Amino acid sequence: MVRTGPIQVVERVPPHKKFIDGVAVRNVIITNQCVRLYPPEIKSKDSQKLPIVLHFHGGGFCISEPDWFMYYQVYTRFARSTRSIVVSPFLRRAPEHRLPAAIDPVRVAGAIPVHPGFVRSNRSRSEMEMPQTPFLTLDMLDKFLALALPVGATKDHPFTCPMGEAAPPLEGLKLPPVLLCVAEMDLVRDTEMEYYEAMKKANKDVELYVSKGMTHSFYLNKIAVDMDPNVSAQTDALISRIKEFIEKH
């Protein structure tokens, strides 16, 4: 079992109404969907309405939950830093619930894909050359998407390749402003950058932020965030850039 300090990363953190380090945690039901809320403690300088950040947690639509300690330590920090209410749904997971079960449409003021994992059926150069990590290996990528995508679909499906030939043309889509966050050493960096270039070509409002020298979902690795000054600094910078985007939109 992977551990981060004395707490297992997959240990469930129960809700708490009390504000701990400035953040409370609640589970609520919204239209038959259980979601976890991370509201920050209101400060005098806060506006009357705090922004809401909806985050779909990782795990290839097959594993993980928003109440795992791995996400708890990120969501609470994010809520404190950005003065936002972080909302993360308990996704209906594959293979029992294949896509699009986990991604029902919502209306948003902006979108912030953080290491979204866009891919194609053919291996990209970064998939062949970048390091595999406990947070993403080629085997995980292949197996999770095989379980999550509709039966018979390949990685070229629009769910995982929104810039591909099978996807609706980006030019014809009404999209909110987008901040695409990419890790420089991510296995799927090249296809994520391909999405960015396709968005620019389609004249969409898209910004790019690259975490230099970082791998996929590095900010979830609490040991590295706590012990490695570079990872800590890159995590701070990522949160700051996201905060800037939220305040802008």
Image (cartoon, rainbow, N blue to C red):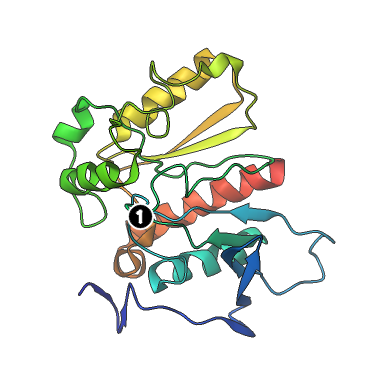
**71 and 221: which one is in front?**
71
Q: Quadrant of the C terminus?
A: top right
Q: From where the camera sits, is residue 81 visible?
A: no
Residue on which disc 1 sits? 96
Q: Residue at x 41, y 41 (%)?
A: 116
Answer above or below: position of 125 versus 10. Answer: above
Answer above or below: position of 181 versus 22. Answer: above
Q: Quadrant of residue 44?
A: bottom right
Q: Residue at x 47, y 48 (%)?
A: 101
Q: From where the camera sits, is residue 224 visible?
A: yes
Q: Quadrant of residue 57?
A: bottom left
Q: Position of residue 29 (x, y in %)?
A: 63, 68
Q: Position of residue 215 (x, y in %)?
A: 29, 47
Tell whether 77 sits left or right of 64.
right
Tell whether 36 sits left or right of 193.
right
**115 and 214: which one is in front?**
115
Badge 1 marks a residue whose secondary structure is loop
Q: Residue at x 19, y 38 (%)?
A: 130
Q: Position of residue 79 (x, y in %)?
A: 60, 64
Q: Position of residue 55 (x, y in %)?
A: 53, 54
Residue type at the position of mark 1: Glu
Q: Quadrant of the N terminus?
A: bottom left
Answer above or below: position of 67 versus 158. Answer: below
**61 and 192: which one is in front?**
61
